[in-house]
Image: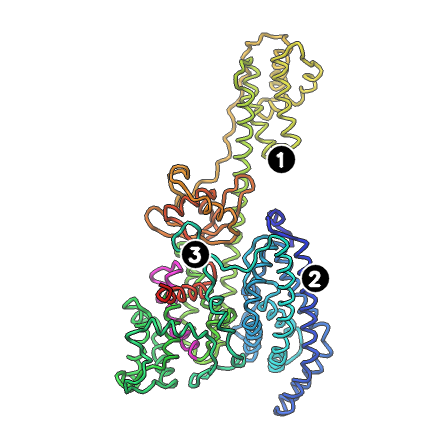
Amino acid sequence: MQTPPFVDELPSRNPDLLNQVREGMLLPLSDAFAAELDAAGAGLFQLADTAAPAQQKEYLDAVQELKRDRESLVARFRAHLAKAWQALEAGRPLSVERTLARGNDLTLVAEAELEVRLAVRNLAGAIQQAWRPELMRLDRYLGFIAGGMRLDSDSNPIGPEHLGVAFYAALSGTRLAPRAQLATVRVCEPGMVERVGRLYASLETQLLAIARASELPTGRARRRGIPGQARSARAEADWISRFFSHWQGGQRAPEAGHAIDVHARAGHELLPAELPRLLQGARAGGDPGAAGDGRRVLSPRELASALSLLQTTPHAGFEEIDRGGDLRAGLRGQLLAHGAMLGIDPASVRMDAADADTLDLVAMLFQAMLQESQVRADLRPVLGQLLVPVAKVALQDPRLFVRDSHPARRLLNLLADACDGNPGETAAELALLAQVQAVAGRVARDFDEHLGVFLQAESEFGAYFEQYRRRVEIAERRAAELQRAEERRVAARTLAAGALEARMQGQALPPVLEGFLRRPWVQHLERVALREGAADGPATTAALAAADGLLRACAEPAARDDAWLERQRPVLQRIYTEAGLAPDSADAATATLLDVLRGLRAADLPAPELPPAPPAPAPVDEAADSPLPDEPPEQVGFDMETAEYFQSLPLGTWLDFVDRFGQVQAGKLAWVSPISGRRMFVNRRGARFCVASPEQLATMVRLGRLRLHRDEDAFYSAMQSVVDSLDTPAAA
């Protein structure tokens, strides 16, 4: 894999430290996997003792297969981690989501295979949940030493998600039956959680020691906005970190791959206690779970039945829920209305407080997601079709809120990303939105109890979305190349114009020399400077020296070096030829110029007539919808801290640009000019959207026309917004 030219130039990139982390983690992680394979035999023997004869044979065969194919299993595991690490070093971290989307058509895959995929996801989620604080810090440290990249659970090459994919890749190359693969994952999970966690803790200790001795970032609260904006005046911890002092995550979750029991509660507290208290506080005065009023509690079966009935009319159902603008109240109202259709008297029942918390949280999450994402009005009910299915999932599988790898959560993120800022103006955008509608409708129609519906939909849509994003990435690279070429042309043109002005200032030159400098020479200088990309390149230096020599010969006849002038003849001929003269005419013009400098001809000879200059390459057009203000930064004023913030803004960061009419459009930081320091942002299609200096961006902040787009995935960002909104009254 070829390294992009900008990677080695990133200020925080530390190749030596990256090598240390790679050597210190990839092999030990592979060894941890190998150790669990060695230990898996005992667990499989125990399963065989109590299994039916057919299953017993599968488990015993699995023991032999794991021993026989051990080295190949470990090799495939290690190969995926190596591939993910190479992508990080190349400056393009490998996405787990995209990896799973490539070549994984689950439409014809058996249910048992889906359960294996779910089990591997559960393994990754268990590691993430057990070691979340360490992983959050490792993401930050590793991203910093890799060049200031933003790493998360999807892109960290040694994170749980990639470990899960590596585990799946290892098993996929064996002859093990799906049921035996599933059993192997479950048997290995506890040991992997412990072994991998120890490696994470050890790595964090090493990096922390290095951070204290260098300039690596230490663990600090993340900034929730841009400096200079009112809301970002204080630094805030993300919502999970905020609860860490009181919460260590839930207990062991239900077994992966099993259908959700919609008539029984999970029985595990997976959310911190503070969050239900905040939710209940937000319902003050109308708590549907309030006791002591004589109403009976709505049973889990009744609740599930009412939700299932509401799910049968997904599009119309959401429009009714959304009618009042409050999804919490709308969901409760429609739930009771559909319960009445089942013979449940709404006046005689109340909802269990925990169920009310879950439904309120899901409704608030959807409301936040739809508000934070720039979703067309007609797409709001399309995504809203998933509200009820996700509510059913959340009631019985609270892992949804705390596990990044949850299939329902990942599908929501994919669909939200596909709709976010998608105007549906091109054929590709319309096709993508059609896929969103199809997937959302299918999930709303088919989901009952099994998460495989979400996993299958995620895989199918993810593969399609991956193709779309590849086209967008190609467009981004093209936009960056065009902008880079334009900046180099401008730099070369500026250098040539400045050199000409400096040499012509205050001098009365013979017309033939002045004409040479103003047209052929300055064009030649611009070309060589553009080609070399540096002001001190050998050809650029030679062109400048040639002009200086000609000027000295003109100004100081006594010190004239005739031999040097004669050596310039071929150079001058070439420059005249480049300006458009025919070879004979170029020779004659060169001879005239040299004769004038030697005093052999009259100094007032006119310059040779040159053909019209070819049109200069058209500059990259400024985007018609550029959000930049007309006023220069010096006129409006800006905060220096804000400008410095934009100077260190990582590539890939999304910002919301607000034009003079109040329209919002997201722009992604795709390229930073090494020449001017300007930042280029692209839109959702990968087209150049805005090119601005840090000072111009700071000016837009002052004018209220620039803010951060969501800085996490759609689900996590919505969760952050919900907690922030709930916590604000308490903090007031």
Badge number at residue 234 = 3
Q: Nearer the viewer, residue 158 or 337?
A: 158
Type of amino acid at the residue the image marks with label 2: Glu
Residue at the spot 58% in from the left edge and 57% down from the top edge = 143
Quarter in which the N terminus is drawn: bottom right
| Label 1, residues with CA under 10 Å away: few <14, some 14-19, many ≥20 | some
For marks 2 and 1 on the same chain, the one whose residue lies earlier in the sequence: 2
The foreground one among 110 and 532 is 532
Disc 3 residue type? Arg
Under circle 2, the secondary element is helix
Residue marked by disc 1: 532
Q: Quadrant of residue 602?
A: top right
What number is the disc on residue 23? 2
Which numbered disc flags the more N-terminal residue, 1 or 3? 3
Q: Nearer the viewer, residue 418 or 74?
A: 74
Q: Which residues are magenta?
A: 369-395
Q: Is residue 57 above or below residue 85?
A: below
- First along the sequence among labels 2 and 3: 2
Is residue 71 placed above or below 52 in the rendered structure? above
Looking at numbered disc 1 in the image, what kind of residue is underneath it? Glu
Left or right placement of residue 59 versus residue 424 in this view: right
Secondary structure beneath disc 1?
helix
Taking 18 as reference, is 99 left or right?
left
Asked whether the viewer can see residue 456, the reply is no
Q: Nearer the viewer, residue 193 or 285?
A: 285
Check disc 3 and report its element: helix, strand or loop.
loop
Picture quadrant of residue 37: bottom right
Main secondary-structure element of the magenta-colored stretch: helix
